[in-house]
Amino acid sequence: MKIRKIKLRELKEADIFKEKILNPEKKRRYRPYYKILKNYKREPSLFIGAYDKNRIIGVAFGHIIKNRILLGEMAVLEEYRNKGIGKKILKKIEQNSKKLNKKYIELGALDNAEKFYLKQNYKPIIFVQIYPKNILKNYNHLNYKIIKETNYVDSKRFYIEVKRYDPKLKEKIKKEFKAYDVIYLFRKYL
């Protein structure tokens, strides 16, 4: 098994591989292939693959956003999980991010991957998205430490500091904020 940068000629195949694992229902993509390609051309060292012989068995796609790296996509074939492959891919992304002098890596994780990132020393943050019509007038009374707020036409977004990981906290915050989406983000300072 080999962990290495994905070559440009392999990128489309790696993207299809990733979509089959992370988006099997073929829902609308958040990051279409042309954006993946654009980010690859900006910094190919953040596109890492795991290969068994010449077969892709895992990938991670990193994207530069100012002083941080957004790990937008990471996927490993099910039969290769729990064998240290995801950990090795992540370490390679971290090494390459350090070389780029970025401050931290941040990512959103599917529920089944949250504990994996905790084991890799990523710290949890709650990310909340609320439709404008549902924004509470005085949300500060809810006693959460909001570390960042952003306003968009379609939503208001909060980043909430948490002391520890608690999967039940997402549902609690979703109800209290009347949010349409609440996920854990994970961050690791380099």
Image (tube, grey):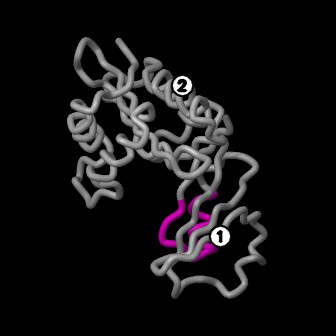
Q: Nearer the viewer, residue 140 or 152?
A: 152
Could you tell me which secondary element the residue under label 2 belongs to?
A: helix
> Where is mark 2, residue-wise?
91
> Is 176 left or right of 50, judged from the image as shown?
right
180 within the magenta span: yes
Q: Quadrant of the N terminus?
A: top left
Sequence order check, earlier mark of 2 and 1: 2
Magenta segment's dominant SS is helix
What's the residue at 44%, 22% (across, down)? Answer: 82
Question: Is 139 displayed left or right of 130 in the figure?
Answer: right
**Which residue is located at x 72 percent, y 46 percent?**
164
Residue 150 coordinates in the image, percent (x, y): 60, 71
**Does the stretch in magenta take in 187?**
no
Is 32 left or right of 159, judged from the image as shown? Answer: left
Pointer 2: residues within 10 angstroms few (<14), some, or many (20+)?
A: few
Residue 4, horizontal then vertical, whole percent:
39, 21
In front of the other: 145 or 66:
66
Q: Residue at x 43, y 18 (%)?
A: 83
**Few, some or many residues within 10 Å of mark 1 (<14, 14–19, 20+):** few
> In the figure, residue 7 lies in which quadrant?
top left
Viewer-closest of 67 and 155: 67
The residue stretch that appears in magenta: 169-182
Q: Residue at x 44, y 35 (%)?
A: 46
Residue type pointed to by label 1: Glu
Query: Residue 15 at what x, y percent from top left?
Result: 27, 40
Q: How many marks?
A: 2
Question: Pointer 1: what residue?
Answer: 149
Is 43 on the left-hand or right-hand side of 160?
left
Question: What type is the residue that disc 2 sits on?
Answer: Lys
Give the quarter of the image for residue 30.
bottom left
Q: Gap between marks 2 and 1, in whole Å?
A: 30 Å
Q: Circle 1 sits in a helix, a strand or a loop, which is it?
A: strand
